[in-house]
């Protein structure tokens, strides 16, 4: 694995993202998305715990009694890539979290689709969040991905992100949204904060798409 030039530090928040090899889809149906979400929840916690493959037999296991190595603040899964906002709680927590998710999901995906080889494009990318302003803007960017990418017309229709939890429409055990929402007086203010940028994010996405095509 390539050496990471930017260290991942405890108690710091990072924007984590990666995409499929050669921009290939990494989620093809509901089961793919659901399996990835299950792994996000599972690999936040240290052991002892049931093996991931045996989770259905231990539905009542209280993961909350175990310490976390990371705290997932928000996420969005797109057909060929993913985004997280993650706070590292333990040494090497983010690397362990992402690597275990990636290895587990790649094995699942390759078995399901009768393929071999890497699924994700090398080492995941990580950008440290340096201010509250950056934190809320990156969370908005992550949550806007489905409309910016023209995957959904309405964010409330897209179930593969933490946005519905942020606006109070869905209880999501995966995310810890308190840090971001503490910067707003109420959830409705966050919803408006995101909604105000929908049209702009779609325009920007169209421009970036043209530029990328020209460069290719």
Image: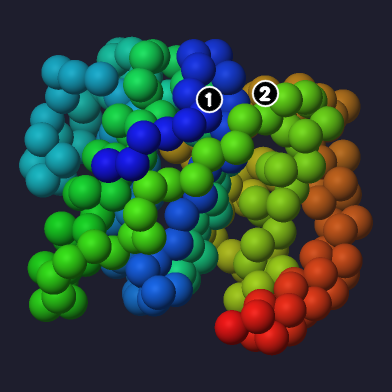
198 lies left or right of 125: right
Q: Position of residue 80 (x, y in %)?
A: 45, 69
Pointer 2 residue? 179
Q: Is residue 175 above or below residue 35?
A: above
Q: Is residue 16 above or below residue 212?
A: above
132 lies left or right of 115: right
Taking the spot 20% from the left edge, 37% from the top edge, the residue there is 59
Real-space Cα separation, disc 2 to disc 1, in angstroms: 10 Å
Q: Where is residue 189 in the image (x, y as percent from the top left)?
A: 87, 40
Q: Position of residue 172 (x, y in %)?
A: 50, 40
Say which label, 2 or 1, has the lower sequence index.
Answer: 1
Taking the spot 37% from the left edge, 14% from the top edge, the residue there is 91
Q: Is residue 157 above or below residue 34?
A: below
- Front-lying residue, 14 or 113: 14
Asked if the residue under mark 1 is in contact with the one under mark 2, i.e. CB atoms within 8 Å, the reply is yes
Report the colour scheme.
Answer: rainbow
- Front-lying residue, 21 or 59: 21
Q: How many C-alpha atoms fall within 10 Å of the one at disc 1: few (<14), some, or many (≥20)?
A: many
* Quarter of the image where the C terminus is located: bottom right
Secondary structure under tag 2 reads helix
Taking the spot 52% from the left edge, 29% from the top edge, the residue there is 6
* Quarter of the image where the N terminus is located: top left
Residue 182 lies in what quarter of the image? Answer: top right
Residue 148 lies in what quarter of the image? Answer: bottom right
Pointer 1 residue? 87
């Amino acid at each position: 694995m390539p050496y990471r030039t930017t260290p991942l530090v405890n108690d710091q928040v990072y924007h984590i993202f990666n995409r499929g090899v050669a921009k290939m889809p990494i989620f093809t149906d509901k089961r793919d998305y659901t399996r990835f979400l299950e792994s996000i929840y599972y690999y936040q916690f240290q052991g002892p715990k049931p093996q991931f493959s045996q989770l259905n037999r231990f539905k009542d296991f209280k993961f909350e009694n175990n310490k976390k190595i990371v705290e997932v603040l928000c996420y969005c899964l797109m057909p060929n890539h993913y985004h997280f906002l993650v706070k590292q709680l333990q040494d090497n927590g983010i690397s362990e979290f992402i690597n275990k998710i990636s290895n587990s999901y790649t094995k699942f995906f390759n078995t399901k689709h009768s393929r071999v080889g890497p699924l994700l494009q090398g080492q995941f990318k990580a950008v440290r969040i340096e201010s509250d302003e950056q934190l809320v803007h990156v969370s908005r960017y992550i949550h806007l991905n489905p409309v910016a990418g023209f995957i959904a017309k309405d964010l409330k229709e897209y179930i593969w992100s933490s946005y519905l939890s942020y606006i109070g429409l869905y209880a999501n055990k995966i995310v810890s949204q308190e840090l971001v929402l503490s910067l707003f007086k109420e959830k409705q203010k966050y919803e408006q904060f995101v909604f105000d940028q929908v049209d702009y994010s779609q325009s920007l996405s169209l421009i970036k798409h043209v530029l990328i095509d020209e460069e290719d």
